[in-house]
């Protein structure tokens, strides 16, 4: 008895290590792919990087000197290697508009995006999961149709348009929330930035007026992003639930006298947890990306806003740095969810 | 009268419907037409899919007859005296900040959207198909390398990468199409590969191999046609995403350039006046929404018809 379970554990831990290795391997490969793409964009597609530095009135000698000092006279693989080395030491060059290193800009703007995406995901999970379970448990009835409609709208409405309509309704007409931006002008620079997340910083210092002001700015963009998260999570929860409820163990539980909703929540629901966590992770990653358009609409000072603003000032260092960071987080979350799924799903473990 | 289309006339003439739904088609053409007929019937019996089909057909008609529908009002004609006029009998959807007729611009915008969607499909589907076919049929290291590359591209954030490409290439419709295509092909490669692997194992492929058919002939004459239906379903489902990404790029100013009437750019133009002149930004946004909805409904319906397992 103890022997067999021992073998079982060894088997499991071996498979986990193998999966971990596989996960790390694909993580490194995908990151290399991402850096290769940003490298190609920066070196070959964008404006001549040397001209961007020396200006178009530079003499031939100055141009050549700059070209050599930037390493552009070397072979392409060598250039890529140097680019990687610089990236690993955190050097993404300087931003033209803010004249700070791109990395410190990104660190400065990241918390705002993080705050927005996190609140949106929380909204999506808190509403989307119960709604999805109800829909799956009552297939073909009105909760089911409701989730299908919510999902369909979530896949069809442009996020920037929904943001504008939301502003028009809840800010312009009803005046329930504050307008664009992250904080009223009167409240700027009062709380010291500890985490960069205003809700937390103001709560630490007990500045509740600032807290509520920040909240009234956050609630609309977060709800709009949250809707997309909700639509996706509810739709996926519904289909996981339908799959589980068709299994024999649910029938067995019902025969033994479990009520229908008892079987739904106590038997079927725990079994959808693993795929559900994957879905939540994926929706979180896609929100970080979806924040680009939302932030533009709401003048939200996050990464997306930073990328688009840099874009129009021809600030390729900042654009590529931002792309790299959003891409890295996106890839990391994506692959990590995939890994979690494979480790925790027993059916995939044994194969 | 003796074309291969004609049913065998030994007995009494069967109706066209009987001929189409026959269990034993006499020719390849009859089998194909029969399949097509059954697909159309299933699609039309689903109200949601039918709505989607109607929306998409309407979009195509509007795009074709845009000047007629707009009453020959130019989408770029400026009338500064009438700028920001609310919807009225003269300007059905109002006018924008340069006094251009929003109805005409919205109608002509259908052409831009349809162009982007068609260009992306024409670029993306063949790339995905080629990669998937080669990987699935040749296997071995070709498969490993191609699918690794596909996985890498699949893990990329689509909008942000399209943004970076569009920024580097410069704004414009062609560059927006290139940017979207570069990030949109991996799912097609995956589907094509999965289909190819299954088809390549079947007996009729072994039979053709024994008859001495070349690899190219097997790939393009026998395997590729069978991959097409799942690719088309996936493409229809993806259309809404492509339209939304294109509109997003347009909204950020990286898509079609002014004065081209592109819906995303039109929403962006109405941003500054959203609180006072709601129609400028709202109406093109509704157009984007309706068209995406149409493609989503149609895609769901097509998936039900061609692949009933995955619903």
Image: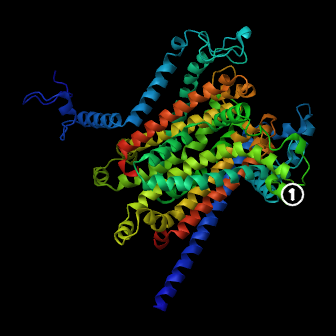
Residue furthest to the left in view is B11
Extreme-bottom residue of the structure: A2
Residue located 52% across and 36% down the image: B239
Q: How is the image coloured?
A: rainbow
Q: How far across and how far down the image is residue A2, in percent? A: 49, 91
Q: Quadrant of residue A14?
A: bottom right
Query: Residue at image x 65%, y 21%?
Result: B260
Residue wearing tag 1: A206
Q: Position of residue B31 (x, y in %)?
A: 25, 37
Residue A249 left/right relative to B96: left
Q: Where is A142 relative to A237, above or below?
A: above
B54 or A325, which lies in front? B54
Residue B254 visible within the image: no
The answer to whether residue A311 is above or below residue A139 is above
For the C terminus of chain A, give its image quadrant.
bottom left
User: Considering the image in quadrants, where does the N terminus of chain A appear?
Assistant: bottom left
In the rendered structure, the residue with mark 1 lies on which chain?
A: A
Q: Quadrant of residue B35?
A: top left
> How many badges with numbers are in the image?
1
Mark 1 is surrounded, within 10 Å at the Cα level, by few (under 14), some (14 to 19) or many (20 or more) other residues, namely few
Q: Residue at x 81, y 56 (%)?
A: A86
Q: Is residue A149 above or below residue B265?
A: below
Q: Position of residue B305 (x, y in %)?
A: 35, 42
In the rendered image, residue A61, in percent from the top left (x then y), is placed at 92, 38
- Direction from residue B83 to residue B104 in the image, left or right: left
């Amino acid at each position: 008895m103890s022997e067999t379970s021992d073998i079982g554990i060894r088997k499991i831990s071996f498979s986990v290590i193998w999966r971990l290795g596989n996960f790390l391997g694909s993580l490194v490969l995908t990151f290399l792919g991402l850096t290769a793409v940003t490298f190609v964009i920066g070196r070959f597609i964008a404006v001549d990087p040397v001209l961007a530095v020396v200006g178009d009135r530079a003499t031939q000698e100055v141009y050549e000197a700059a070209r050599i000092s930037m390493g552009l006279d070397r072979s392409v693989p060598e250039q890529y290697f140097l680019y990687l080395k610089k990236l690993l030491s955190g050097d993404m060059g300087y931003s033209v508009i803010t004249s700070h290193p791109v990395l410190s800009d990104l660190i400065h703007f990241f918390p705002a995006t993080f705050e927005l995406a996190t609140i949106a995901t929380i909204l999506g999970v808190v509403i989307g999961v119960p709604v999805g379970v109800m829909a799956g448990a009552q297939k073909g009835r009105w909760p089911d149709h409701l989730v299908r409609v919510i999902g369909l709208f979530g896949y069809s409405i442009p996020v920037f348009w929904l943001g504008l309509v939301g502003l028009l309704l809840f800010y312009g007409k009803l005046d329930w929330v504050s307008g664009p931006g992250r904080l009223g002008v009167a409240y700027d620079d009062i709380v010291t930035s500890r985490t960069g997340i205003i809700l937390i910083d103001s709560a630490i210092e007990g500045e509740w007026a600032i807290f509520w002001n920040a909240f009234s700015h956050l609630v609309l963009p977060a709800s709009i992003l949250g809707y997309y998260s909700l639509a996706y999570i509810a739709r996926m929860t519904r289909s996981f639930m339908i799959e589980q409820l068709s299994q024999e163990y649910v029938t067995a539980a019902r025969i033994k006298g479990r009520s229908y909703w008892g079987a739904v929540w106590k038997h079927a629901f725990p079994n959808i947890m693993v795929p559900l966590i994957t879905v939540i992770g994926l929706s979180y990653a896609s929100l970080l990306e979806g924040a680009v358009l939302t932030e533009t609409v709401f003048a939200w000072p996050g990464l997306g806003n930073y990328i688009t603003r840099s874009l129009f000032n021809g600030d390729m260092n900042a654009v590529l740095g931002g792309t790299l960071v959003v891409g890295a987080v996106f890839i990391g979350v994506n692959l990590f969810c995939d890994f979690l799924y494979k480790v925790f799903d027993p059916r995939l473990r044994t194969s | 009268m003796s074309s291969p289309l004609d049913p065998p006339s030994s007995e009494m003439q069967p109706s066209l419907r009987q001929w189409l739904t026959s269990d034993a088609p006499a020719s390849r053409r009859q089998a194909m037409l029969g399949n097509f007929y059954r697909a159309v019937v299933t699609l039309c019996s689903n109200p949601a899919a039918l709505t989607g089909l109607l929306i998409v057909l309407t979009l195509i008609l509007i795009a074709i007859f845009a000047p007629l529908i707009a009453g020959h009002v130019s989408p770029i004609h400026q009338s500064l005296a009438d700028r920001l006029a609310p919807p009225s009998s003269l300007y059905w959807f109002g006018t924008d900040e340069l006094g251009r007729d929003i109805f005409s611009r919205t109608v002509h915008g259908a052409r831009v959207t349809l162009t982007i969607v068609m260009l992306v499909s024409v670029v993306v589907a063949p790339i995905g198909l080629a990669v998937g076919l080669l990987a699935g049929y040749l296997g071995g290291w070709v498969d490993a390398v191609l699918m690794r590359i596909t996985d890498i591209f699949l893990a990329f954030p689509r909008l942000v990468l399209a943004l970076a490409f569009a920024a580097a290439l410069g704004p414009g419709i062609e560059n927006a199409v290139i940017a979207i295509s570069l990030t949109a092909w991996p799912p097609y490669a995956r589907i094509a590969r999965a289909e190819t692997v299954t088809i390549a194992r079947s007996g009729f492929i072994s039979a053709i191999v024994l008859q001495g058919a070349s690899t190219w002939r097997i790939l393009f004459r026998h395997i590729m046609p069978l991959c097409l239906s799942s690719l088309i379903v996936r493409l229809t489902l993806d259309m809404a995403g492509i339209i939304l990404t294109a509109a997003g790029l347009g909204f950020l100013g990286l898509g079609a350039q002014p004065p081209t009437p592109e819906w995303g750019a039109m929403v962006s133009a109405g941003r500054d006046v959203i609180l006072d002149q709601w129609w400028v930004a709202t109406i093109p946004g509704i157009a984007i929404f309706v068209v995406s909805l149409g493609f989503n409904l149609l895609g769901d319906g097509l998936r039900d018809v061609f692949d009933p397992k995955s619903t």
